[in-house]
Amino acid sequence: MKKFSKVVLAMMLVLSLASVVFAAEAAPATGAAVAQKADSGSVQFFAFSALAAALGVGIGALGCGIGQGIATSKACEGVARQPEAASKIQGVLILGLAIIESLTIYALVIGLILLFANPFTKFFVS
């Protein structure tokens, strides 16, 4: 598992560096050097915003998926040990899964804010 996490972190680093390089190269060529620099900065800003949104939603979904799997397995173990308590375990499990799922929805909302209503745009894009 540690080797897998190292590989995933290395891939995220490579992707983030590649997005910066491609964003710098993808800036449209204009006549004035100042306009080109501003365009390049805005392209990099939006590339980093997209990367942050993707990583935030991805890591949030990954963590919540792991949490839901652990909660479900423990609920199954509880029902297997005490079948008479199945209805109570089921109610607590559903409540817990709803709370875990809300964290994924919060990550999605933050990602959508970064993509479509970024409050920092006025600082980086002129």
Image (cartoon, rainbow, N blue to C red):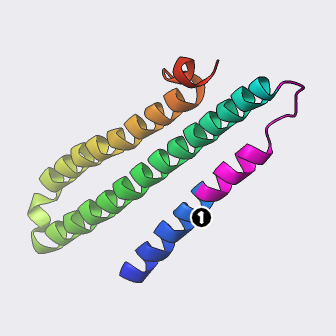
- Residue 113 seen in this snapshot: yes
Out of 82 and 121, give the one closest to the viewer. 121
Q: Quadrant of residue 69?
A: bottom left
Out of 53 and 94, give the one closest to the viewer. 53
Asked if the magenta segment contains residue 18, the reply would be yes
Out of 22 and 118, give the one closest to the viewer. 22
Q: Quadrant of the C terminus?
A: top right
Percent x, y of residue 99:
27, 41
Please report the residue visible at 75 percent of the width from the left and 25 percent of the height from the top: 34
Please report the residue visible at 58 percent of the width from the left and 55 percent of the height from the top: 16
Please report the residue visible at 21 percent of the width from the left and 63 percent of the height from the top: 75
Whether 90 is drawn above or below 52: the answer is below
Whether 35 is drawn above or below 13: the answer is above
Q: Residues within 10 Å of mark 1 (few under 14, many from 20)?
A: few
The answer to whether residue 28 is left or right of residue 46 is right
Percent x, y of residue 43:
69, 35
> Which residue is labeled 1 in the image?
14
The answer to whether residue 29 is left or right of residue 84 is right
How many marks on residues? 1
Percent x, y of residue 36:
78, 30
